[in-house]
Amino acid sequence: MLQTFLQAFGGTFMAVLDIFLIILVAGLLVRRRVVTQAHIDALSTATVVVFLPCLTFDSVLRNLDPAKLPYWWTLPLAAVAMAVAGLALGAALFARELPMKRNMLALASMQNAGYLVLPVGLALFPDEFDRFALYCFLFILGNSLVLWSVGKLLATRGQPGVPMWRALLTPPLVANVAAIALALSGGKALVPEVLQRGVHLLGTAAVPVATFILGAVLGSIPFRPRAILPDAARVMLAKLVLLPLLTATVLAWTGLGRTDPLLVSFFLIQAAAAPAVALILQVRRYGGDAEKVGGVMLVAYAGCLLALPFWLALWRVMS
């Protein structure tokens, strides 16, 4: 059993390490000022406006078959349920310091459901990535709703800015909803094949570019460990230990692993993923403790490098 665990852990760790090395290089380029904030902003805009919507539209349109996946709507609901569970765990660990440390609740419950999970899925399941990406985009429907409402409320000072509905109405969300509508209505045939091929080609750039952006954003965050380690430890306990444990328990109880092992792995990756980078972007835009939120996030990403392969390897041994 131990040998099986170590083999599974080692294989998963090396796959995840490749992604984190890209993140590290991107962060170092930012620290050395080779990559500037203007470069990050330009790449982020291209990804959010072009590459990610194309990947979303292509994956959902080609892979969402209501006959084969009749319960597709449970994925957005599962995202909300996972966020609520994370909030409850975070609230229990920070109960004596609320509402002063409510920003830690956002870090304990809102994971990087796209920019981190997608490259991990591509590295671990290259032959099944289209279906993995479909699960991811359906999950993000619910995740984005919580992230840009409850997450923003907890992470920031609540200064007035863009209305919540405007923050939710992003190009990836529009592409997601449009592709779902076409898939459910049988309108896929209305999309010309040449357009589908072009969208697919642009979508292939989304994952590597998004991985680089993730590292660049993390590399621009100031880090002073002594001030944030106690809070970071509790955030990691909630996000990287208790939430994956709770998720694995629910998955074992449902028996989902016997019918859809890929979906089980997807849920475990989501549960053990590090906090959403969108939280630090929200703090920068709407006000808040950017240094603390960013510092805790950096520590959580380091912990995620071990947590992701640990939970996937443990599940493989259990099953």
Image (tube, rainbow, N blue to C red):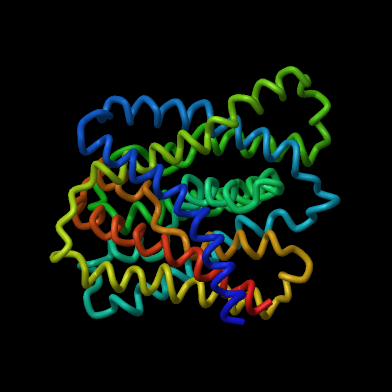
| Numbered circles on residues, count | 0
Q: Which residue is drawn at 80% across and 55% down?
A: 70
Residue 187 horizontal/vertical position (percent): 80, 31
Q: For the view shown, which residue lies furthest in the front direction?
A: 3
The residue drawn where x is 40% and y is 31% is 44
Quadrant location of the C terminus?
A: bottom right
Q: Is residue 145 left or right of residue 296?
A: right
Q: Is residue 102 left or right of residue 109?
A: left
Side of 64 where 288 appears, left or right: left
Q: Residue 15 in the image: x percent, y percent? A: 52, 53
Please provide percent x and percent y for residue 17.
45, 53
The answer to whether 214 is drawn above or below residue 293 in the figure is: above
The residue lying at 59 percent from left, 25 percent from top is 202
**Residue 61, picture quadrant:** top right
When the figure is inspected, residue 6 is found, relative to residue 83, above or below; the finding is below
**Residue drawn at 80 percent across, 37 percent down:** 185
Percent position of residue 162, x then y: 34, 37
| Quadrant occupied by the N terminus | bottom right
Q: Which sits in the foreground, 283 or 167?
A: 283
